[in-house]
Amino acid sequence: VNITDSEALATWQPAIAAVDNYVVSYSSGEGAEVTEMVSGNTVEYDLKGLQPATEYTLRVHARKDARSSGSLSARFTTGLDAPRDLSATEVQSEAAVISWRPPRAPVTEYLLIYESIDGRVKELVLDPETTSYSLTDLSPSTQYTVKLQALSGALRSKTIQTILTTTGLLYPYPKDCSQALLNGEATSGLYTIYLNGDKAQPLQVFCDMSEDGGGWIVFLRRQNGKQDFYKNWNTYVAGFGDPKDEFWIG
């Protein structure tokens, strides 16, 4: 038996003696038995319109005139049908919402995999009631392939996929706080900038996004007296303090 989630191809060895017909019967525990008669020259029959993730009992016997042979029988379980209509919406520079329609058969979980064009892969296991998921921490201006598979016990559906491309930032690798501001960052705090815009040279700094229009790198921050600023020259060269509180950047 060759099986999908909605069809199965039943095959059998022909009878030694000539026969008029073969009688093919199949049923599940939930529905009435279906019986079809095919030519005696046929050794296969395509069962269609089956329910996904369902066990069926198949029987085949030969007929010659009014006589019937003994029956051959087999049990098979149809595959789990795949989720449908996978799509990406609300695509932003670092986030997107993935949604889908569930399979007809009950599922126990979903396997969601998304991979960036440069080969970074993340894999998530989601609850069976889930029909949408928000992807976060994505990279701007990056293409992602999103794949979804349904699971029901040991059964796995076919994988469906969609492709999305995150929106771009004006400066994907801002070299200072002013470029971070132009990227839409409006809250003072810690940001990662990149020396000369080189992604291989990240540096975390405190950006003032409010004073005089914002976009300033803060080299020295004193506000509550917690930090001792009486340091030697080498310490000032290296930098010190808490970048979230009082500090000298170095």
Image (cartoon, grey):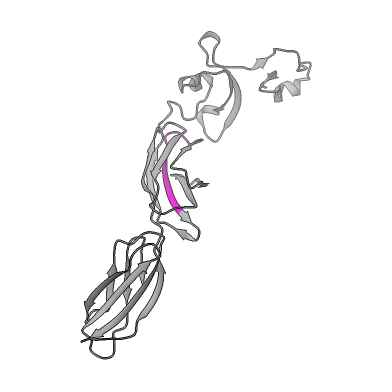
Is 25 drawn above or below residue 171 in the view shown?
Answer: below
Q: Residue furthest top?
A: 212
* Residue appearing at x 53%, y 20% in the figure: 177
The x, y position of residue 220, in whole percent, is 66, 15
Is 61 drawn above or below residue 114 in the view shown?
Answer: below
Task: Work out whether residue 86 or residue 130 is closer to the camera in this orientation and state it.
Answer: 130
Q: Is residue 135 magenta?
A: no
Instruction: Name the image quarter holding residue 7.
Output: bottom left
Q: Where does the C terminus fall, quadrant-wise?
A: top right
Is 53 drawn above or below residue 114 in the view shown?
Answer: below
Task: Work out whether residue 40 or residue 210 is closer to the camera in this orientation and state it.
Answer: 40
Residues drawn in magenta = 139-150
The x, y position of residue 203, in whole percent, is 59, 29
Left or right relative to 153: residue 88: left
The x, y position of residue 119, in whole percent, is 47, 47
Q: Where does the N terminus fall, quadrant-wise?
A: bottom left
* Residue appearing at x 75%, y 23% in the figure: 235
Task: Work out whether residue 15 or residue 71 is closer to the camera in this orientation and state it.
Answer: 71
* Residue appearing at x 35%, y 68% in the figure: 27
Magenta stretch, main secondary structure, is strand
Instruction: Name the image quarter holding residue 78.
Output: bottom left
